[in-house]
Image (tube, grey):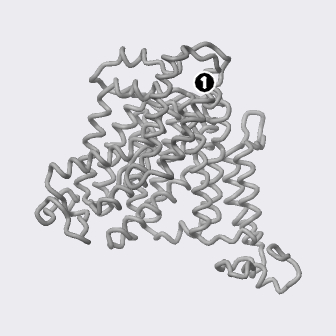
Amino acid sequence: MSLGVRWTLHGDGKTPAPGAVVRPDERLSWPRTFGLGAQHVVAMFGASFVAPVLMGLDPNLAIMMSGVATAIFLLATKGRVPSYLGCSLSFVGVAATIRASGGDAATITGAVFVVAVALFLVGLAVQRFGARIIHAAMPPVVTGAVVMLIGFNLAPVTASTYWPQDQWTALAVMLFTGLAVVCLRGFLSRIAIFLGLVFGYALSWVLDLVFGKIHSPLGGGAATDHWRLNLSAVGEADWIGLPSFHAPSFEWSAILVALPVVIALVAENAGHVKAVGEMTGDSLDDKLGTAIAADGAASMLSTAVGGPPNTTYSENIGVMAATRVYSTAAYWAAACFALLFGLCPKFGAVVAAIPGGVLGGITVILYGMIGLLGAQIWLNGRVDLRNPLNLVPAAAGIIIGVGGVSLKITDNFELGGIALGTIVVITGYHVLRAFAPAHLKTQEPLLDSGTSAYDEDSGDEGAGPGKS
């Protein structure tokens, strides 16, 4: 049985011919392949070490387990789906919510382990019944709303924890990162978050030299005098060593907060498989269930030892699009590099020292981008928000998720934020759809005239959303 670890040499192994692509089962010469692998590591670094820092997890372990996860994914898909699996940013809000409720790193990884199990089971179901079960249970209006509320739920973390630590550095980093995203071209634009972190790191060091300590809240606590950039732990860290492992712990309240993120992970995996299939010209629909299940299995292993969950990385799709090299050999090289980085505690200490003000400038953009991915899902799915069947559950769920609305069930149990918002969106949509008249259930593309399918089918020319 093929495991996708044998490749044929593409051409002379040096440069693809004009218009040609290096397919997943091909490779360039090994030196060039390892160079491409290093490029994939750089591409995923920005998000893959920011995410564990924001979640309060060990960045060394996160990088190491991303390499392990990538290897698992490549083996499971038999080398047909080139992909790098890095730490998922979708769980940052979940981690912040769990910590605000008194949870620790073990509570976070326990909750996310359950999400990984759910993702694995969804993958098996898709493998068995086809992608239609995803479209039936989670149409674009539902998926978009859930992704949006997950992203925007993070806003208070930036506003209360990171930004106040050094507001002027945060503002400078935000502006620099925004310019990098918009003005840079090609590969540099895809690592703009990483460049923003490097800029903020250097700026904080310079400000400490020029102005000394800053008097500000540290980590959401009381204001105190402290260095913007504290590198004391870097000097004490070893060059070589194992990352910090820990076992997960399980609490129902944390699990319920985390479970909705499985919807975002399914959407990410589905989008990735479709994008790679279009780029390589190889229909990968038959691998969708396998890809989702592989992501779930890899995340189960990562969280079982105290690492973060993983997901397919769009940053690396950008590298493939720019180089036209889709060889899975390059991803195996990237996985090996990630394993080596994970064995360097000093690297983890450098990452953990990122100043709060720098994270404030980064997250004010990053969290908003996560939320707006939900709007992009609506646009791609041509969701008509003038149809009340779509508008009502999405509107209610997003406000609940963003505003932190809670519903007290018993003295010891309540639902709120992401969990309650997701439940409202999913159940609200399907319940309303069961009782809605037929003309509201027909999803049609928007018309140039500005009218919607709802307006046209209602038979009432003088009423309904969109009329003026």
The residue under the point 65% across, 58% down is 145
**Quick check: 230 left or right of 241?**
right
Image coords of residue 222 (percent x, y) = 68, 17
State the quadrant of the N terminus.
bottom left
Q: Secondary structure at mark 1?
A: loop
Residue 1 visible in the shown view: no
Residue found farthest to the front: 210
Q: Amino acid at mark 1?
A: Gly
Q: Residue 262's spot in the image, x, y percent?
A: 54, 52
What residue appears at the point 28 percent right and 22 percent down from the top-left corner?
239
Which quadrant does the C terminus fall into? bottom right
Residue 131 vs 232, above or below: the answer is: below
Other residues around mark 1 within 10 Å, as few (<14) / some (14–19) / many (≥20) = some
State the residue in front, 404 or 325.
325
Q: Nearer the viewer, residue 65 or 182?
A: 182
The residue at which mark 1 appears reads as 219
Q: Is residue 306 left or right of residue 152?
A: left
Pick out the residue farthest to the bottom. 459
Whether residue 133 is visible here, answered yes or no, is yes
Residue 120 in the image: state x and y as whole percent.
45, 53
- In terms of image quadrants, where is residue 185? bottom left
Above or below: residue 372 compared with residue 356: below
Q: In the image, residue 4 lies at what x, y percent?
A: 22, 59
Q: Is residue 236 left or right of residue 356?
A: left
